[in-house]
Image: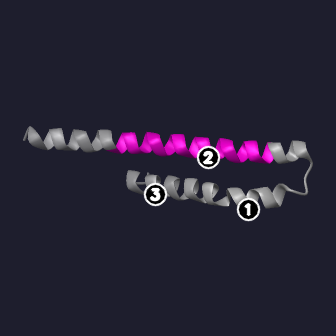
Amino acid sequence: MLPIELKIDRAQRFLHMIEKDAPLLAVRVAPLSRERQESARSYAAELAARAGAELKRLLEQKAFSDSNELSAHGAD
């Protein structure tokens, strides 16, 4: 299993890549029909939303595990 920090890094990079690619996506889909353009944009937006949700979940998981580590060491 991958460490949480690596998962967070991958999710951040993927989200950044999708956000950075938005202007280029418009150029790539310009020759397509309006329906296909909307489908491509919708898919990209869905990927960004899922990546953002996954990043949020991973950050919350890390914060939770970090807080558990701190409280476990405090009880020693």
Tell us which disc is closer to us: 3 or 2: 2
* Mark 3 Cα shell of 10 Å, populated few (<14), some (14-19), many (≥20): few
The picture quadrant where one finds residue 49 is top right
Q: Name the residue under label 2.
A: 48
Residue 59 in picture, x, y percent from top left? 40, 45
Residue 66 in picture, x, y percent from top left? 26, 45
Residue 2 covered by magenta stretch? no
Q: Residue at x 59, y 41 (%)?
A: 50
Q: Which of marks 3 and 2 is nearer the N terminus?
A: 3
The picture quadrant where one finds residue 21 is bottom right
Tell us which disc is closer to us: 1 or 3: 1
Element type at marker 1? Answer: helix
Q: Mark 1 points at which residue?
A: 24
- State the quadrant of the C terminus: top left
Q: What residue type is labelled 3?
A: Asp
Contact flag, marks 3 and 2 (Cβ < 8 Å): no
Whole-number angstrom distance, CA of label 3 to CA of label 2: 15 Å
Element type at marker 2? Answer: helix
* Mark 1 Cα shell of 10 Å, populated few (<14), some (14-19), many (≥20): few
Q: Which amino acid does label 1 sit on?
A: Leu
* Highlighted range, magenta: 39-62
Q: Mark 3 points at which residue?
A: 9
Left/right placement of residue 25 relative to residue 70 reads right
Contact flag, marks 1 and 2 (Cβ < 8 Å): no
Tell us which disc is closer to us: 1 or 2: 1
Left/right placement of residue 16 relative to residue 26 reads left
Left/right placement of residue 57 relative to residue 69 reads right
